[in-house]
Image: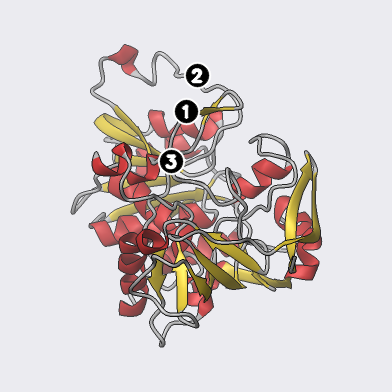
């Protein structure tokens, strides 16, 4: 059986490069030859054992590539075509999809967690930090890449861009809104761009890394609070003349940032949560106004599917969001262990790493 190189979860604290069989495909599937992929913060949660997956699973969920082979029932595509697939790969015909929540396609309880629905790559099936990846339900999930867009330009679309933008969309940012984004990692930076596109006119980022602060300003942040120089809640309240923000986007996944988001909201504001949390959250009584503040808390799993990917690539093609600066490092797939070490320890100003087989 033909083999391929792949990054495989061995045990908590260990992801190794190993050989694995090139997957066989079913009638509705496609086999993608991966040309570029990347490492996500969620992959680091898997590496650390904070999010459990099966041992021996190929990790990764952000594929850009070329169609190598098509299932017998797949139409509308051709072998050799450049495509991306979202991190979330809904079937298109489940109850969740037909209820308008395609990201939760297939959700259920697994390992004590509420399984993250349509997130299959590197979660419930083999992922894309490999030479090849099987894309399920190809006609719902493969999105052709326009010839004039490079791999780097569309690399953020499968997850980071879709997730960050959804923070603004789920928070229902409106024209003239004030928005705070806690943590300017890749998702937070995309949330900045999304808030600007949605019409926010005051966009306040919270971080301390100079390179991230600079990119945030380029993507649309009107203010950035360095949490090592000022207390973020007090500074955001000062910047909004005591009113608070309409939407606070939590993009890190910690108790501290979640609580800070609650504390900067105006009455009736919305906390839009994008973080992946590894411990229970607590809601402070005062920050939640004892449940009487008309506050909304919404969570979002990265929207996927081919139409979502097409729309995001339209944003890139229009020049309204330039996310290429988020790719700060490049590694070959053979160097995946070193890439994980760099990314997990956030050294050398890393934001996103382009991995090429």
Element type at mark 2: loop
Residue mark closest to the camera, 3 vs 2: 2
The one of 350 and 25 positioned closer to us in this rendering? 25
The answer to the question of whether label 1 and label 2 lie on touching residues, with beta carbons closer than 8 A, is yes
Residue mark closest to the camera, 1 vs 3: 1
Element type at mark 1: helix
Tell me which numbered mark, 1 or 3, is placed earlier along the sequence.
3
Circle 1 packing at 10 Å, graded few (<14), some (14-19), many (20+), is some
CA gap between label 1 and label 2 equals: 8 Å
Residue in the image at 41% along x and 87% along y: 147
Using the rendered image of the protein, determine whether residue 341 is visible from the camera's viewpoint. Answer: yes
Q: Position of residue 171 (x, y in %)?
A: 29, 42
Point out which mark residue 282 bears. 2
Q: Name the residue under label 3.
A: 235
Element type at mark 3: helix
Residue mark closest to the camera, 1 vs 2: 2
Point out which mark residue 259 bears. 1
CA gap between label 1 and label 3 equals: 15 Å
The one of 205 and 299 positioned closer to us in this rendering? 299
């Amino acid at each position: 059986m033909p083999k391929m190189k792949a990054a495989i979860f061995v045990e908590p604290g260990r992801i190794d490069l190993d050989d694995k069989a090139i997957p066989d495909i079913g009638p509705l599937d496609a086999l993608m030859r991966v040309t570029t992929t990347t490492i996500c913060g969620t992959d680091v949660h898997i590496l650390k054992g904070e999010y459990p997956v099966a041992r021996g699973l190929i990790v990764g969920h952000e594929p850009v590539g070329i169609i190598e082979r098509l299932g017998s029932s797949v139409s509308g595509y051709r072998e050799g075509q450049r495509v991306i697939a979202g991190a979330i790969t809904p079937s298109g015909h489940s109850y969740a999809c037909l209820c308008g929540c395609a990201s939760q396609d297939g959700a259920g309880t697994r390992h004590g967690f509420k399984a993250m629905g349509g997130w299959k790559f590197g979660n419930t099936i083999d992922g894309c930090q490999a030479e090849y990846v099987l894309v399920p339900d190809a006609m719902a999930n493969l999105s052709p890449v326009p010839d004039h867009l490079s791999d780097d330009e569309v690399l953020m679309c499968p997850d980071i861009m879709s997730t960050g933008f959804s923070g603004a969309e789920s928070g229902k940012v409106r024209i003239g809104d004030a928005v705070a984004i806690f943590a300017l990692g890749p998702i937070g930076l995309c949330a900045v761009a999304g808030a600007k596109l949605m019409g926010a006119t005051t966009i306040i980022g919270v971080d301390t890394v100079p390179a991230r602060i600079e990119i945030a300003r380029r993507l649309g942040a009107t203010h950035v609070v360095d949490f090592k120089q000022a207390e973020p809640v007090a500074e955001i309240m000062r910047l909004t003349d005591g009113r608070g923000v309409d939407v606070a986007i939590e993009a890190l996944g910690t108790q501290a940032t979640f609580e800070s988001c609650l504390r900067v909201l105006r009455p009736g504001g919305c906390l839009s949560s994008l973080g992946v949390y590894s411990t229970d959250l607590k809601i402070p009584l005062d920050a939640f106004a004892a449940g009487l503040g008309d506050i909304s808390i919404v969570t979002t799993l990265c929207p996927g599917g081919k139409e979502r990917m097409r729309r995001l690539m339209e944003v890139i093609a229009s020049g309204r969001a330039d996310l290429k600066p988020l790719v700060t490092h490049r590694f070959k797939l053979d160097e995946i262990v070193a890439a994980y070490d760099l990314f997990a320890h956030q050294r050398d100003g890393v934001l996103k790493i382009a991995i090429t087989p």
